[in-house]
Image (cartoon, coloured by chain):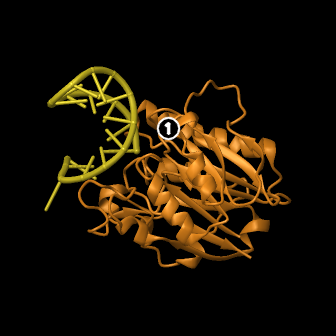
Amino acid sequence: MKVATWNVNSIRARRQHVVDWLDAAQPDVLCLQELKVAESDFPYEEIKDCGYEAAVFGQKTYNGVAILSRRPMSNVVTDLGDSEDDPQARLISAEVDGVTIFSAYFPNGGEVGSDKFEYKLRWIRRLREALDGRFDPDADRVALCGDFNVAPFDDDIGRPTEWRSSVLACDAVRDALIELASFGLRDVFRPFHPTGGVFSSWDYRGSGFERGNGLRIDHVYCTAKLAERTIGAIVDREERARNSPSDHAPVVVEFA
DNA sequence: ATGTCAGGCGTAGCCTGA
């Protein structure tokens, strides 16, 4: 089973990229983030023509997440299940072949110390509580995929001096991710790239891709039963090198 | 910090968010 996650930075701007990528990469599941469209504007027909069902949680202009799957999806959930009134479309989950797949777009966080930053930390805590309420980490197969907007280690950022104190790599967000993962989730990508320096996102500004100044912030975190079946994990850098790319490249994980 | 994008509004070019 091949599962991928990709922040496409607008499904309308990247529609043809997604279609071409599905045809070439043939994943079983593709999690998308930053659709930037209401559900009514999602290109369901083109995706269906590629052979995929789509579960979509859209929002005009901002955020928006989806799960595309070749196999039937069930139990689609589009919220954190708590009492907070939150209009931001950042999370969707669905069951495919007994595995619960999440497509998550974690808040960016703006600037350290800002309201957006506090929202980011709180959102990650809320996600942990949602997992606690829904799953048994020892028994259930769960894959949390998406743009986490957190680079876990210093070798997950191209220029540590530039990024280390930012909302994407500071201690507070790394600690929040550790606390989230302590539910019973493992980063299944990193063991295949033990020396680091493999990025999934490069800022458009300052020619980040051309200068090797990227970040690994797109992740697949799995419960043990699924994690132990991981047989490969790559970033499709070629997609980032195409014309008019998203600032993120697809991250692809394969399970036995 | 920013040699960049994308969408909204509204129909040019500024604003927001990332």
The residue type indicated by label 1 comes to: Val
Colour that chain A carries in the picture = orange
User: Which residue is at a point 72% across and 34% down the rendered structure image?
Assistant: A81
* Near-viewer residue (A49 or A226): A49
* Left or right of A10, for residue A227: right
Between A196 and A145, which is closer to the camera in this rendering?
A145
Residue at the image position 79 percent from the left and 41 percent from the top: A133
Whether residue A85 sits left or right of residue A162 in the image: it is right
- The residue labelled by disc 1 is A37
Total labels: the figure holds 1
Q: Colour of chain B?
A: yellow
Q: Is residue A205 left or right of residue A169?
A: left
Q: Position of residue A141 (x, y in %)?
A: 79, 60
The image shows residue A36, relative to residue A228, as above or below, that is above
Residue A58's place in the image compared with A177, above or below, is above
> Which element type, helix, strand or loop, lies under badge 1?
loop
Image quadrant in which you'd find residue A25: bottom right
Depth order, front residue of A184/A107:
A107
Whether residue A24 is visible: yes
Q: In the rendered image, which quarter is residue A253 located in?
A: bottom right
The residue drawn where x is 57% and y is 40% is A90
**Residue A57 image position (x, y, % from top left):** 61, 39
Quadrant of the frame with the N terminus of chain A: bottom right
Which corner quadrant holds the C terminus of chain A? bottom right
Mark 1 neighbour class, 10 Å CA radius: few under 14, some 14 to 19, many 20 or more: many
A212 w.r.t. A85: above or below: below
